[in-house]
Image: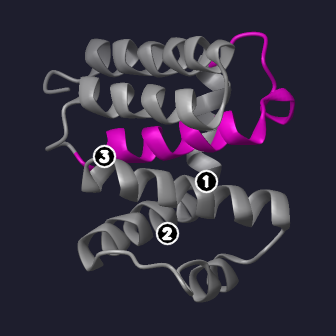
Amino acid sequence: MGSRRKSRELALQMLYQREVGGHTPESVLENFFTGKNVEPDVKSFARELFEGTVREVSDLDRLLREHSEHWRLERMAAVDRNILRLALYELHHYPETPPAVVINEALEIARRFSGAESVEFVNGILDAVRKSRAATDPNP
């Protein structure tokens, strides 16, 4: 597994821990890596993704609501909701990573941490966001 994928998976686990466990972002960061042997570059990117996603969760959720027809955020599985938040954050803040790569990574993570139906769900929402961005941004 590549180091970027590992970072994304770690960031997802931190997001899940924060939301489901009700922990503060500071508490998650303080305790998450304890006892884990994680390469510095993997840890650094995971922290960036986690902190950025948490910082912008309201905007990311607004975007999710706009592109998830017939699905309230509260009805989405916590894992799927956080995979989507993470991918949306990366799509908007890491333009050097092609959107197709971000989406594919989100799908692979959904396969690992969620289920087959979740993969289709995540793909549908991220593809809708990608198409929306392409329609409004001359340099998507």
Q: Residue 51 has which mark?
A: 2
Give, as a single range, the part of the protein colored magenta: 68-94
Amino acid under label 3? Met
Q: Residues within 10 Å of mark 2 (few under 14, many from 20)?
A: some
Q: Mark 3 and 1 residues: CB-CB less than 8 Å, in contact?
A: no
Residue 122 part of the magenta-drawn span: no
Q: Check disc 1 and report the residue beneath it.
A: 57
Badge 1 marks a residue whose secondary structure is: helix
Dot 2: element: helix
Rendered image quadrant of residue 139: top left
Q: Give how far apart the Cα atoms at labels 2 and 1 are.
A: 10 Å
Nearer-the-camera pick, 20 or 39: 39
Q: Nearer the viewer, residue 51 or 79?
A: 79
Residue 90 vs residue 101, the one in the foreground: 101
Question: In the drawing, does residue 70 fall left or right of residue 61?
Answer: right
Q: Quadrant of the C terminus?
A: top left
Q: Could you give the CA–CA distance between mark 3 and mark 1, rounded to whole angstroms?
A: 27 Å
| Colour scheme of the rendered structure | one colour
Q: Nearer the viewer, residue 127 or 78?
A: 78
- Verify whether residue 91 appears in magenta: yes
In the image: residue 9, left or right of residue 72: left
Name the residue type under label 1.
Val
